[in-house]
Image (tube, rainbow, N blue to C red):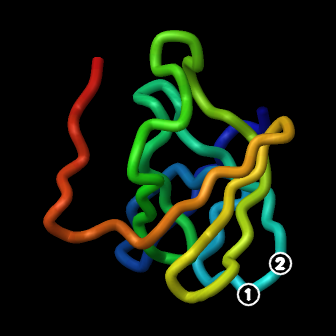
Amino acid sequence: MVPPTTVTDHTGRFLQKLPGTQDHAERGVAYTHSVYAHCGGRFTSFDSREWDAGVAPFDAGGALGYVDGTMTLMRGDVAVFETDGRIIEYRPKDPVVRRELCA
């Protein structure tokens, strides 16, 4: 995995940004992307939005850290993550749905 890079935001604070995290994605373009799989990988950030797979697509007990692959914005409401022959569909996260904390 490529390590995160340190960037500054508009206030000058340092932030870590994962490789391939796209602020503005074009439809149909496959971007290098990493999903945080330690907690199952249900949620990810892409195209300046939070995305939800609906279920945890990775075994939280076995997949520690990040899973690398590509993310493609298919439509405004569908993004597809591909890794090791798997295709996982993400939809924009409903603001009512809360991310659960995991250890």
Callout 2: 10 Å neighbours few (<14), some, many (20+)? few
Up-down relation of residue 51 to residue 3 (above or below): below
Circles 2 and 1, Cβ within 8 Å, touching? The answer is: yes
Q: Secondary structure at mark 2?
A: loop
Image quadrant assignment for residue 56:
top left
Quadrant for the C terminus in the image: top left
Residue visible at 52% across and 50% down? 16
Q: Secondary structure at mark 1?
A: loop
* Position in image of residue 61 (x %, y %): 47, 11
**Image position of 73 (left or right of 95):** right
Residue at the far left: name it.
96
Residue visible at 73% across and 87% down? 26
| Kind of residue sitting beneath label 2 | Val
- State the residue position of label 2: 29
Quadrant for the N terminus in the image: top right
* Position in image of residue 17 (x %, y %): 58, 54
- State the residue position of label 1: 26
**Image position of 5 (left or right of 7):** right
Give how far apart the Cα atoms at labels 2 and 1 are. 6 Å
Count the marks: 2
**Image position of 60 (left or right of 78):** left
**Observer-nearest of 92 and 12:** 92
Up-down relation of residue 12 to residue 10 (above or below): above
Residue visible at 84% across and 36% down? 84
Residue at the far top: name it.
61
* Position in image of residue 91 (x %, y %): 47, 69
